[in-house]
Structures are given as structure tokens and as C-alpha cells.
Image: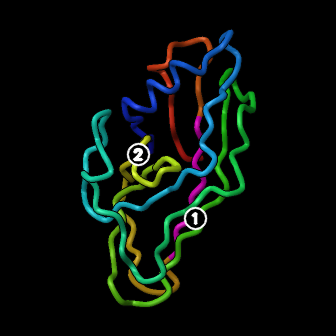
């Protein structure tokens, strides 16, 4: 599974490479949302193109703890989000989850989206999805080589 960054995120990344050594993009305050309909990730995708989950117990994953930003791993600079737990608490409004997306702190700007290899049901307890976003960037490459992928 890999995230497809939007053009907006790629533009932001192009402005943060100073000396080719730091991943300095600030994703604090961002949200992780679950997507409940098929979609095609792409650089021009917007939040309005997606159907956000509505299963009973759903709430956006809100990053209030901050990302572990800029750890060096395997030649890349890597940032880890906090763990986002999503759990169905009832059987009203069941969904099938096709992917997830990173939304900016303004709650509307789509930064990246990921289509799961296999959709996941979120229909009733104990259906649970635990998600940590891992954002890696190769400082030796150009900003178009950014990779977003879960562990």
C-alpha cells in the first residue's frame, strides 16, 4: 500500500528540502480519514472526490500528539504519525473501507490518499482498524520521489 501525494503536498515538499538533509514538513494537526467508496488516488484528487466513512463510532483520526519527524532510516528521512485507532461500536451505518487519506489541519485540504489492496469491513464490533502513517522522503532525490506508505 502506498499513498499518492496530491500536487499540493508535492509543492510543499519542494519547499522544505534545505541542504538535502531534513524532512521538515509540519503535519501536526492533520487528520487521517477513512474512505468508504472506491476511488482512484492521484495528484489532482480532492477531499470532495471521496466518500468519508460513516460507520457507527467513526471519527477522524486527529493528530494532536505530533509526528516523530525526520528520523533517518535506510537512507531516507522518515516521519511517523501517532497510532490512529478506528473501531465500529455498533451496527448502524456499516461501511466497507477502501482506503484512507491525510487531510490538512484545516480539515478540508487533501494531502495524500491510499487505496487498500483489499477493502476492510467496518460493520459492527469488534471490527477495528489500527493505522500508523509513515512518511518517507529520499533527500538525495527530488520532491517527486516522496513516498508515503504504512508500515
Please check the rendered image and state whether residue 147 is part of the magenta-colored stretch, yes or no. Answer: no
Q: Residue at x 49, y 19 (%)?
A: 143
- Toward the viewer: 111 or 88? 111
Tell me, what colour scheme is on the image? rainbow
Q: Quadrant of residue 37?
A: bottom left
On the image, the x and y values in percent for residue 85 come to 59, 68
Q: Main secondary structure of the magenta part?
A: strand
Q: Quadrant of residue 73?
A: top right
Judged left or right of residue 26, residue 10 is: left
The nearer-to-camera label among 1 and 2 is: 2
Q: Residue at x 70, y 25 (%)?
A: 74
On the image, the x and y values in percent for residue 125 come to 49, 86
Magenta stretch bounds: 128-135
Q: Is residue 106 above or below residue 34?
A: above
Judged left or right of residue 113, residue 64 is: right
Q: Quadrant of residue 82?
A: bottom right
Is the residue under label 2 in contact with that under label 1 (CB below 8 Å)?
Answer: no
**Secondary structure beneath disc 1?**
strand
Crowdedness of circle 2 by 10 Å Cα count: few (<14), some, many (20+)?
A: some
Q: Quadrant of the N terminus?
A: top left
Q: Is residue 131 above or below residue 105?
A: below
**Secondary structure beneath disc 2?**
loop
Judged left or right of residue 129, residue 41 is: left
On the image, the x and y values in percent for residue 115 come to 36, 50
Q: Residue at x 61, y 32 (%)?
A: 25
Inter-mark Cα distance, 1 to 2: 23 Å
Crowdedness of circle 1 by 10 Å Cα count: few (<14), some, many (20+)?
A: few
Q: Residue at x 45, y 59 (%)?
A: 33
Q: Which residue is mark 1?
A: 130
Q: Which residue is mark 2?
A: 109
- Toward the viewer: 113 or 127? 113
Amino acid at each position: 500500500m502506498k499513498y499518492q501525494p496530491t500536487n499540493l503536498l508535492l509543492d510543499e515538499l519542494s519547499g522544505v528540502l534545505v541542504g538535502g538533509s531534513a524532512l521538515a514538513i509540519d503535519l501536526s494537526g492533520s487528520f487521517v480519514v477513512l474512505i468508504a467508496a472506491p476511488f482512484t488516488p492521484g495528484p489532482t484528487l480532492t477531499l470532495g472526490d471521496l466518500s468519508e466513512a460513516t460507520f457507527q463510532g467513526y471519527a477522524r483520526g486527529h493528530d494532536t500528539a505530533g509526528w516523530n519527524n525526520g528520523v533517518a532510516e535506510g537512507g531516507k528521512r522518515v516521519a511517523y504519525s501517532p497510532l490512529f485507532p478506528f473501531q465500529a461500536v455498533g451496527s448502524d451505518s456499516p461501511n466497507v473501507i477502501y482506503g484512507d487519506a491525510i487531510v490538512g489541519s484545516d480539515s478540508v485540504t487533501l494531502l495524500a490518499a491510499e487505496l487498500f489492496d483489499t477493502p476492510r469491513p467496518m460493520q459492527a464490533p469488534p471490527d477495528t482498524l489500527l493505522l500508523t502513517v509513515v512518511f518517507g522522503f529520499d533527500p538525495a532525490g527530488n520532491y517527486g520521489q516522496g513516498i508515503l506508505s504504512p508500515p
